[in-house]
């Protein structure tokens, strides 16, 4: 398959996922929006604006030589750290005990989303520059761990454990592929596992999430409520679903029906066929993304595309896993489908970068 075909298929797969998302956002949020905002198209209109913004930025990064991003790797990382610090002050908006957003008139910006992209670009540039030193714990592993630890700490203070885990997992994989010795990575993995255990047991709400994951029926009206309602939605859809727009769980039973648990509404309304179709689209997206990685024209493009594909894949897998009750609740949106502002926009930017790398690889 030539790179031009890969670009076209990757673009079309993304468009199909976005279209599915737009339809399902309306279906999942229409009644809630009419009740709360007196406009059943409230979330659809806002999501359309996110699509326009994301498309414009994706086109911009497609037309810009991705290799020039290397000179912005450090400045972008510094800016992301400053934004993560600022959001923890009074400038950040607090929702449900979490301070993660800058709130503008119609758009909420989550600096952790920018930090994810910034650290992927930085690590890709670092591995490309330090090709001969990446195996060194002093000059290769420790500098990256310092950067990752600093960004992760600021995101944990929001608090946002899900995003922290996703960043760590992606960077770990990039370092593994980059040639960092396994003994160093195993040491980092052991240390990270101990820290994760401490972070979970130190916060009662995280322990409740773990308990709800193990046995949601132990607290069906509390910590297990979301998982139970999600599973009811998926199970009641059967093979063919109840029909588009006929979900019962979206009627104020399933919280975050148009965001974190939109996959459950897909299962209820479109059935097993709909959920399998969405999963197959993500499988196709991942396969095409990995082809971009394989055919990247240079080392920086290789690791940049690898990080982007891994991040989008990780979010999709976790979101679907949470909806099915196979993972504890994390609060990560389903890429291209869930309603969202900055998360959706940065997903679009990631696709634009992948198409850019594929284009350069085709021209090589």
Image (spheres, grey):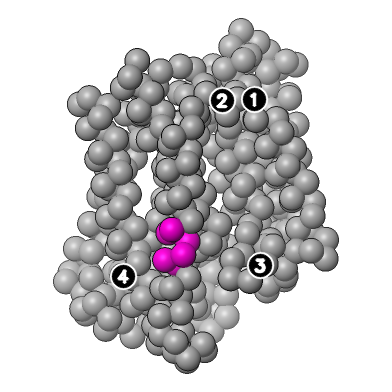
The label number, if any, that marks residue 68 in the structure image: 2
Residue tagged by mark 4? 23
Q: In terms of image quadrants, where is residue 241?
A: bottom left
At which x and y percent is residue 282?
A: 32, 48
Residue at (69% x, 62% y) in the render = 102
Task: Report the front residue among 60 and 212.
Answer: 60
Q: Give whichever of discs 1 and 4 has the lower sequence position.
A: 4
- Number of labels in the image equals 4
Q: CA distance from mark 2 to mark 4?
A: 37 Å
Camera sees residue 116: yes
Quadrant of image for the C terminus:
top left
245 inside magenta stretch = no
Reply above or below: 184 against 202: above
Residue at (26% x, 83% y) in the render = 246
Q: Nearer the viewer, mark 3 or mark 4?
A: 3
Q: Give whichever of discs 2 and 4 has the lower sequence position.
A: 4
Mark 2 neighbour density, 10 Å: few (under 14) some (14–19) many (20 or more): few
Q: Give whichever of discs 3 and 4 has the lower sequence position.
A: 4
Quadrant of image for the N terminus:
top left
């Amino acid at each position: 398959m030539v790179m031009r075909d890969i670009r076209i298929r990757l673009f079309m797969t993304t468009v199909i996922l976005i279209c599915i998302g737009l339809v399902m956002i309306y279906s999942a949020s229409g009644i809630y929006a009419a009740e709360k905002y007196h406009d059943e198209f409230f979330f659809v209109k806002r999501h359309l604006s996110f699509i326009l913004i994301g498309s414009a930025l994706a086109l911009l990064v497609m037309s810009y030589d991705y290799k020039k991003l290397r000179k912005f790797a450090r400045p972008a990382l510094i800016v992301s750290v400053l934004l993560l610090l600022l959001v923890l002050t009074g400038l950040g908006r607090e929702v449900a005990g979490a301070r993660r957003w800058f709130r503008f008139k119609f758009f909420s910006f989550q600096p952790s989303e920018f930090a994810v992209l910034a650290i992927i670009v930085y690590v890709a540039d670092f591995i490309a520059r330090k090709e001969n030193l990446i195996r060194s714990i002093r000059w290769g592993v420790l500098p990256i761990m310092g950067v990752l630890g600093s960004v992760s700490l600021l995101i944990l203070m929001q608090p946002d454990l899900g995003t922290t885990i996703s960043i760590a997992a992606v960077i770990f994989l990039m370092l593994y592929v980059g040639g960092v010795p396994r003994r160093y990575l195993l040491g980092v993995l052991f240390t990270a596992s101990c820290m994760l255990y401490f972070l979970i047991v130190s916060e009662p709400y995280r322990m409740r999430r773990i308990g709800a994951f193990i046995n949601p029926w132990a607290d069906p009206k509390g910590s297990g409520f979301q998982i139970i309602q999600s599973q009811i939605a998926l199970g009641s859809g059967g093979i063919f679903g109840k029909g588009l727009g006929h979900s019962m769980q979206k009627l104020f039973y399933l919280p975050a029906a148009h965001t974190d648990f939109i996959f459950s509404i897909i299962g209820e309304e479109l059935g097993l066929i709909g959920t399998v179709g969405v999963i197959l689209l993500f499988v196709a997206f991942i396969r095409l993304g990995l082809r971009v990685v394989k055919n990247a024209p240079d080392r920086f493009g290789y690791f940049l595309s690898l990080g982007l594909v891994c991040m989008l894949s990780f979010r999709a897998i976790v979101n679907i896993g949470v909806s099915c009750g196979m993972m504890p609740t994390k609060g990560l949106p389903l890429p291209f489908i869930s309603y969202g502002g900055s998360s959706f926009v940065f997903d679009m930017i990631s696709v634009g970068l992948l198409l850019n790398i594929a284009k350069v690889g085709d021209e090589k």
